């Protein structure tokens, strides 16, 4: 049986927007596909598979324990539920019971963002109640601490390019507040590339997306304190049941993490080298000024940034790039300022040439 775009009447896509959920996030390697195939072709005791792959990943990542979940969002919801329930089987069966009142989750106001769904939706799904600390443009350790009450269950920190970057406390500072007040700190690091940094900074639970930097199949990963990870596993009897992950993706993702730890990801220097001829081609197009920019959150990621001038707006150019096959998706966050960014981590040289050709047609 042949699988193709044509079979399902789908457009081909060039993903120059980055590791985005709306496009399937990333491609997986032959190694990962082989692990998924093994998973798909065999049976396992699923509880044992969860524990043993968690132990394997924990050893790789030098943490107490780990749990593969269906997505980073599921990781947030189940982590919140786990810390609220604190190992109670009654709570797992009745996650929104009024018998449990310690549900406040302190979150910097500038971290309460929509990343495809609002952070507060995932907190609420886990039974938590968001308490915003600080202001949209500022949050200090003192702002976090002044919001702590006897109803506080945890502190949540979102490490993402979606959040406010300036005048925000660091993970280390949030960890210091959490430790001082005997509270767990959850760090959502979904798209982050460093699998060691945030645990070392003092977080108790850290959540990663499986299909973003790690380039695995649809999955998520929660690492951290053993007791908390065991409480997360308990959520399989409650809200986690609707978020369960299949055996093929558990094994595929575990292989992806191993490969990622051993091989790393593309360096910023490599991206700059690949971007240089792309930028030169873009700068030959009328009404386009192109340059290389670094990721706004300071990660070692470099992108092409074009400023659109002339009769067409950046938003119009974006729509025309998507209109045909291959549909070209870009980073649209600054379109209202006339700027379009191209993330080339999942784009090869031939696809970059297609982007240049399409833009020549659009801008002429």
Image (cartoon, rainbow, N blue to C red):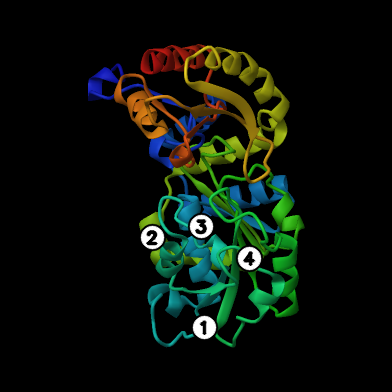
Cα separation between marks 2 and 4: 37 Å
Residue marked by disc 2: 241
Residue at image position (50%, 44%) is 250
Residue marked by disc 3: 75
Cα separation between marks 3 and 4: 26 Å
Asked if labels 3 and 1 touch by Cβ distance under 8 angstroms, the answer is: no
Residue 332 horizontal/vertical position (percent): 45, 38
Q: Nearer the viewer, mark 2 or mark 4?
A: 4
Mark 2, residues whose alpha carbon is within 10 Å: few (<14), some, or many (≥20)? few
Residue at the front extreme of this rendering:
310
Quarter of the N terminus within the rendering: top left
Mark nearer the N terminus (2 vs 3)? 3
Quarter of the C terminus within the rendering: top left
Residue marked by disc 4: 138
Q: Can residue 248 be seen in this view?
A: no
Mark 3, residues whose alpha carbon is within 10 Å: few (<14), some, or many (≥20)? many
Q: Is mark 3 on a helix, strand or loop?
A: helix
Q: Is residue 201 visible?
A: yes
Quick one: 351 or 249, which is closer to the camera? 351
Mark nearer the N terminus (1 vs 3)? 3
Q: Nearer the viewer, mark 1 or mark 2?
A: 1
Mark nearer the N terminus (3 vs 4)? 3
Residue 341 horizontal/vertical position (percent): 52, 32
Cα separation between marks 1 and 3: 20 Å
Residue 223 horizontal/vertical position (percent): 63, 56
Q: Is residue 270 above or below residue 108?
A: above
Q: In this view, does 66 lie above or below 175?
A: above
Asked if labels 3 and 2 touch by Cβ distance under 8 angstroms, the answer is: no
Quick one: 110 or 259, which is closer to the camera? 110
Residue 102's disc is 1
Mark 4, residues whose alpha carbon is within 10 Å: few (<14), some, or many (≥20)? some
């Amino acid at each position: 049986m042949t699988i193709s775009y044509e079979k399902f009447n789908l457009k081909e896509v060039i993903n120059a927007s980055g590791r985005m959920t709306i496009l399937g996030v990333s491609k997986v390697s032959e190694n990962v596909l082989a692990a998924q195939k093994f998973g798909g072709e065999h049976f396992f005791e699923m509880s044992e598979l969860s524990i043993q792959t968690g132990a394997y990943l924990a050893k790789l990542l030098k943490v107490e324990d780990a749990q593969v979940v269906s997505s980073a969002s599921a990781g947030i919801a189940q982590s919140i539920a786990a810390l609220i329930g604190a190992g109670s089987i009654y709570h797992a069966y009745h996650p929104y019971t009024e018998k449990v009142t310690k549900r406040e989750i302190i979150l910097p106001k500038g971290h309460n963002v929509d990343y495809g769904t609002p952070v507060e939706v995932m907190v609420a799904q886990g039974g938590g109640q968001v308490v915003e600390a600080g202001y949209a443009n500022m949050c200090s350790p003192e702002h976090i601490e002044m919001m702590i009450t006897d109803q506080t269950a945890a502190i949540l920190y979102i490490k993402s390019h979606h959040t406010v970057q300036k005048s925000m406390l660091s993970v280390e500072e949030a960890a210091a507040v959490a430790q001082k007040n005997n509270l767990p700190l959850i760090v959502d690091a979904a798209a982050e590339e460093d699998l060691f940094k945030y645990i070392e900074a003092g977080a108790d639970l850290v959540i990663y997306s499986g299909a973003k930097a790690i380039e695995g199949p649809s999955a998520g990963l929660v690492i951290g304190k053993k007791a908390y990870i065991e409480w997360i596993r308990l959520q399989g009897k409650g809200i986690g049941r609707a978020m369960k992950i299949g055996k093929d993706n558990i094994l595929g993702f575990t292989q992806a993490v191993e490969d990622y730890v051993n091989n790393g990801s593309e360096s910023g220097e490599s991206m700059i080298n690949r971007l240089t001829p792309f930028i030169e081609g873009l700068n030959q197009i009328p009404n386009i000024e192109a340059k290389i920019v670094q990721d706004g959150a300071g990660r070692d990621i470099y992108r092409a940034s074009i400023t659109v001038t002339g009769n067409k707006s950046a938003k119009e150019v974006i729509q025309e790039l998507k209109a045909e096959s291959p549909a070209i998706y870009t980073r649209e966050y600054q379109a209202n300022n006339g700027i379009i960014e191209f993330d080339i981590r999942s784009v090869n040289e031939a696809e970059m040439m297609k982007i240049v050709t399409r833009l020549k047609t659009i801008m002429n």
